[in-house]
């Protein structure tokens, strides 16, 4: 097969093999472009049912245009055989990364899974179930850009089934109970598979084990899943989300990929908020220091009046000397005082501030004190505060944040800042908006967190979000 030319692409090497077929790396003989070429095993080519399922995969995946789904470029027929030409993905699968690391932290796993949930949500909206979601079918490229691969077992809802009734298709460890039993499926089955995928990524283990398929089905039927915290230390809230995603009964599971994604977003938002400061015990009331000094000054002047001889010049000199000493002491006390707090927002002010800079910049009195950090065209650092409300980013006014970049649209994106939470929305820009190298869907609010990198055109901005000083 090596060296064969399919659709103008010369097959170089086999890069994958599955139950239905194999995948080869192909290089265009003229342009040098690299693609992946998927084909059926020779012994299955004459099986019409298998060939129809192969064509169904191409039909399903061709409908999906999403930044986190591997794209089909064309379907080629050569001497009665069909070949699927797909984009070539370089990187490592989620399975390879978990095996290399043992397990992933939530900060590593959740951004990856969120991209996959966005992709699966897109497929579900078009009535397409994947039915074989697992770490081996998730490719992680440079910059942790993630793509779903292999819709070979995909099912178009409402279309005629190409499998025998009561037959299960997929990878057993990641299959939902209803899928193992060959029952009718809906979007909750893909949710279950992604729940097991997240479980595996966080722990390096599986919720159910079995030496055979029969053992696995029996354990799944009779036992409860092993809590992730038995394998790795994990936040109880995140553990609850994982266990809900892999609930045996579909009504107890997240009913859609969007619900699963929203639960993870809520967890990340709550986790990004700092713990409330410990309450200090109330201080016992005392007399203000200035009252003590005023009282001391008055009583000292009165005592001085009684003791100093009644010579007017001598008495006046003593009084002036005493007042000068008191004034010098008060001046020293004022210069060494600690910074005060703004009476409006309660935040601690720097000593040199004449007015509270937090209030001047419009930072809210609750939630997050947030800003974007980047550079101006001269290459010098710049900071743009993000007050509560809507903040528009674009190339020209009336955008609140104006960026001099010819690849940025006039009104490119918006940040919505409410109650300590921020969301970024691409407004249908010409070149798109990216968070940590992942392109956003237009008009789809996406949460942003401290440390996220936002790219618009050639400009990259970093989110800095810290709590207000109590």
Image: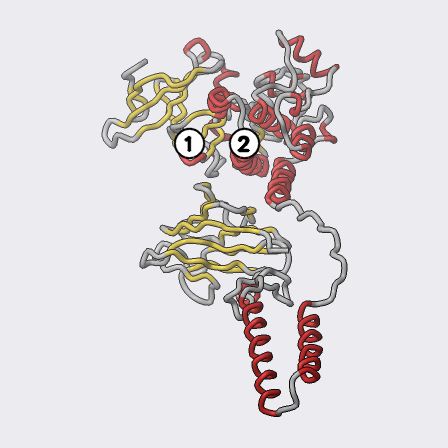
Separation (CA) of disc 2 from disc 1: 14 Å
- Which quadrant is the C terminus positioned in? bottom right
Asked whether the beta carbons under mark 2 and mark 1 sit within 8 Å of each other, the answer is no
In front: 249, or 127? Answer: 249
Residue 173 in which image quadrant: top right
Q: Is residue 27 above or below residue 355?
A: above
Instruction: Name the image quarter holding residue 267.
Output: top right
Q: Earlier in the sequence, mark 2 or mark 1?
A: 2
Q: Position of residue 300 (x, y in %)?
A: 68, 77
Q: Is residue 428 placed above or below 289 in the rendered structure?
A: above
Q: Is residue 123 visible?
A: no
Residue 86 locus on image (x, y percent): 40, 28
SS state under label 2: helix
Q: Quadrant of residue 310?
A: bottom right
Q: Residues within 10 Å of mark 1 (few under 14, many from 20)?
A: some
| Viewer-proximal residue among 321 and 366 | 321
Q: Is residue 34 left or right of residue 429?
A: left
Q: Nearer the viewer, mark 2 or mark 1?
A: 2
Q: Identify the residue at horizontal 54%, vertical 35% (top origin).
A: 107
Q: Nearer the viewer, residue 178 or 365?
A: 365
- Would you call the spot at circle 2 few (<14 residues within 10 Å), some (14-19), or many (20 or more)? some
Q: Quadrant of the N terminus?
A: top left
Q: Secondary structure at mark 1?
A: loop
Q: Residue at x 70, y 82 (%)?
A: 302
Q: Which residue is mark 1?
A: 141
Q: Picture coordinates of residue 133 (x, y %)? A: 55, 25
> Which residue does the numbered mark 2 point to in the structure image?
109
Q: Residue at x 56, y 80 (%)?
A: 321
């Amino acid at each position: 097969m090596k060296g064969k030319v399919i659709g103008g692409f010369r097959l170089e090497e086999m890069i994958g093999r599955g139950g239905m077929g194999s995948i080869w790396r192909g290089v265009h003989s003229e342009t040098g472009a690299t693609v992946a070429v998927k084909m059926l095993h020779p012994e299955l080519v004459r099986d019409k049912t298998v060939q129809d399922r192969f064509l169904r995969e191409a039909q399903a995946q061709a409908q999906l245009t999403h930044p986190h789904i591997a794209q089909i470029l064309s379907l080629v027929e050569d001497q009665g055989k069909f070949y699927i030409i797909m984009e070539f993905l370089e990187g490592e699968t989620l399975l390879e990364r978990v095996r290399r690391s043992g397990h992933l932290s939530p900060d590593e796993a959740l951004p990856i899974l969120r991209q996959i949930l966005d992709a699966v949500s897109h497929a579900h909206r078009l009535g397409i179930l994947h039915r074989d979601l697992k770490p081996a079918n998730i490719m992680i490229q440079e910059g942790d850009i993630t793509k779903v691969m292999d819709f070979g077992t995909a099912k178009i809802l409402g279309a005629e089934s190409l499998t025998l009734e009561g037959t299960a298709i997929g990878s057993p460890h990641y299959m939902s109970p209803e899928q193992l039993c060959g029952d009718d499926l809906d979007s909750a089955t893909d949710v279950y598979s992604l729940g097991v995928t997240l479980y595996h990524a966080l722990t390096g283990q599986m919720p159910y084990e079995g030496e055979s398929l029969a053992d696995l089905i029996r354990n799944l039927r009779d036992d409860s899943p092993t809590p992730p915290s038995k394998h790795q230390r994990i936040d109880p809230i995140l553990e609850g989300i994982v266990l809900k995603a892999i609930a045996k009964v579909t009504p107890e599971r997240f009913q859609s990929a969007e619900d699963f994604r929203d639960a993870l977003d809520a967890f990340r938002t709550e986790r990004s908020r700092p713990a409330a400061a410990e309450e200090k015990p109330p201080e016992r009331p005392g007399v203000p220091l200035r009252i003590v000094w005023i009282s001391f000054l008055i009583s000292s002047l009165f005592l001085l009046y009684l003791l100093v001889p009644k010579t007017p010049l001598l008495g006046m000199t003593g009084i002036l000397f005493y007042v000068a000493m008191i004034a010098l002491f008060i001046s020293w006390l004022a210069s060494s005082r600690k910074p005060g707090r703004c009476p409006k927002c309660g935040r601690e002010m720097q000593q040199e501030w004449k007015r509270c800079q937090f209030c001047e910049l419009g930072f809210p009195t609750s939630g997050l004190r947030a800003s974007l950090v980047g550079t101006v065209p001269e290459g010098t650092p710049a900071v743009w505060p993000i007050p509560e409300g809507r903040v528009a980013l674009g190339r020209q006014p009336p955008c609140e944040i104006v960026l001099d970049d010819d690849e940025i649209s006039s009104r490119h994106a918006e940040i919505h800042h409410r109650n300590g939470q921020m969301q970024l929305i691409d407004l249908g820009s010409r070149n798109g908006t990216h968070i940590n190298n992942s392109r956003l869907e237009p008009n789809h609010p996406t949460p942003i967190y401290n440390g996220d990198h936002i790219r618009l055109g050639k400009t990259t901005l970093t989110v800095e979000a810290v709590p207000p000083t109590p």
